[in-house]
Image (cartoon, helix red, strand yellow):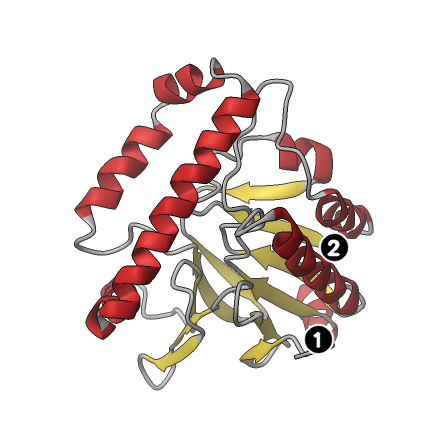
Amino acid sequence: MTEFFYMQKKIYFASDFHFGVPDAETSRKREDLFVQWLEKIKVEAAEIFLMGDLFDFWFEYKTVVPRGYTRLLGKLAEIADSGIKVHLFRGNHDMWAFDYLDKELQIEIHRDPEIRNFNNKTFYLSHGDGLGTGDRGYKFIKKVFQCRINQWLFRWIHPDIGIGLGLFWSRKSRFANQNRENRDPVEKQKIGSRLTLYSKKVLETHPEIDYFIFGHWHYPQEIRLTEKCKQLSLGDWLTHFTYAVFDGEDLKLLAFQHSGS
């Protein structure tokens, strides 16, 4: 029954939307495009996997959530209510998504890499941040941000100040990384190369894997790791508007053909 279901429906993967930047107006336009995409795919979708960095910054206070994103959250709630499973793998920009999206929108939150099976194909799913060797600076910062005491302390900052600071830090970090990549082509390839080495290492203990799917690296790319296994980097919804779709037999990397594209 499950195999037949997945043969008739498709599974979609997309990542790195960073809603909230570079400004409210531009973000809103990209949000509208993403809502169009969700409306288009919902007819054929069995499950939708959002592979991280849905927002450029997200923090859930006890009684407050960030302002905005009404159309996005409304569409995701509508899709989940219709019976389509929606997943979010937390990324480095939305690692402070706790239980609001799960309780209010029925979006299943994933905090660690997972191995899933769809129609007898094995998928390794992860946002991609902090995997493999190197990148020690980020791994240290991630531990600081994941510390419950630090999260509790941040909640004591007024939301207007806390969310403003979070957006400022997030933008500064991302723009600094972009400038570094633009100056140095080798730097641009570091994350992609690190993910490929990581995938090959995982294959040593999990040779059954058919597909690795990652976000985090904003450049859409397919890499053949073995005759059986392929790695996909999903790209982003800042400049590429790319996504992957699994039809029960094959996984393809596509770009959303929206008006004006």
Q: Is residue 253 above or below residue 163?
A: below
| Spot occupied by residue 9 in the image (x, y as percentages of width and height) | 72, 70
Q: Is residue 45 above or below residue 167?
A: below
- The residue identified by callout 2 is 84
Indicate the secondary structure of the residue bearing disc 2.
loop
Which of the two labelled residues, at mark 2 and mark 1, occupies the earlier sequence position? 2
| Spot occupied by residue 215 in the image (x, y as percentages of width and height) | 44, 60
Q: Is residue 17 above or below residue 192?
A: above
Between 173 and 150, which is closer to the camera in this rendering?
Answer: 173
Q: Residue at x 74, y 55 (%)?
A: 84
Q: Residue at x 68, y 70 (%)?
A: 10
Q: Residue at x 77, y 52 (%)?
A: 79
Between 226 and 168, which is closer to the camera in this rendering?
Answer: 168
Q: Residue at x 53, y 37 (%)?
A: 58
Between 42 and 91, which is closer to the camera in this rendering?
Answer: 91
Alpha-carbon span between mark 2 and mark 1: 23 Å
| Spot occupied by residue 100 in the image (x, y as percentages of width and height) | 63, 31
**Counting other residues with Cα less than 10 Å from the Cα at mark 2, is it few (<14), some (14-19), or many (20 or more)?**
some
